[in-house]
Amino acid sequence: MHVLIRSALFVATLGVSLSALAGGQAVTVYQDPNCGCCHGWAEHMRAEGFEVQEIPTTDMAAIKARLGVPMELASCHTARIEASGQIIEGHVPASAVRKLLASSQIRGVSAPGMPLNSPGMGALDGNLVTVDFDGQAFSKD
């Protein structure tokens, strides 16, 4: 019986630890005011425990340049994790953002283009590949 209780406590603690990686993390997302999929991504992030501020802008190219997004990895919106300064380009799932938060040496991650199997665009299917800003595979969700 004690083993069962200890196991349940461990699982509960693990769940709290994983949610703490996102819990309350402030994310600012810059997006074209006419783009609905960007808002869909923001809603996905909110549902995963992130605090998301949406900033509409018609000059996404300037935002991407200022934040150092490699143009070959560009997507429709760009987000910044306020605490770490790390960059999220496009429809990167929350699970990959949590991995980014745990990898402070990585400056940013991207889901280049507008993949249909990504948050805000469609359902994750296990085949969405995100890349770091060096173009290396980062996650598969």
Image (cartoon, rainbow, N blue to C red):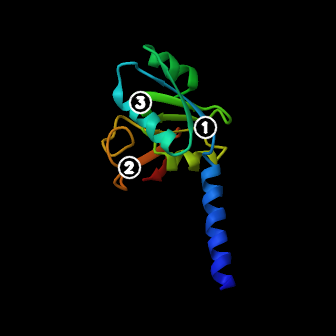
The span from disc 1 to disc 3 (Cα, nearest Å) is: 23 Å
Q: Is residue 17 above or below residue 26?
A: below
Closer to the chain start, of discs 3 and 2, is: 3
Indicate left or right for 32 with 132 as reference.
left
User: Which corner quadrant holds the N terminus?
Assistant: bottom right
Q: Are marks 1 and 2 in contact (CB under 8 Å)?
A: no
Q: Farthest residue toward the bottom? A: 1
Q: Which mark is residue 128?
A: 2
Residue 8 in the image, given as x and y percentages of width and height: 62, 72
Q: Secondary structure at mark 2?
A: loop
- Give whichever of discs 1 and 2 has the lower sequence position: 1
Q: Is residue 75 in sight in this rendering? A: no
CA gap between label 3 and label 2 equals 19 Å
Residue 39: give its label: 3
Q: Amino acid at mark 1?
A: Arg
Q: Looking at the rendered structure, which numbered label has been put on residue 135?
A: none
Q: Which numbered mark, 3 or 2, is in the foreground of this view? A: 3
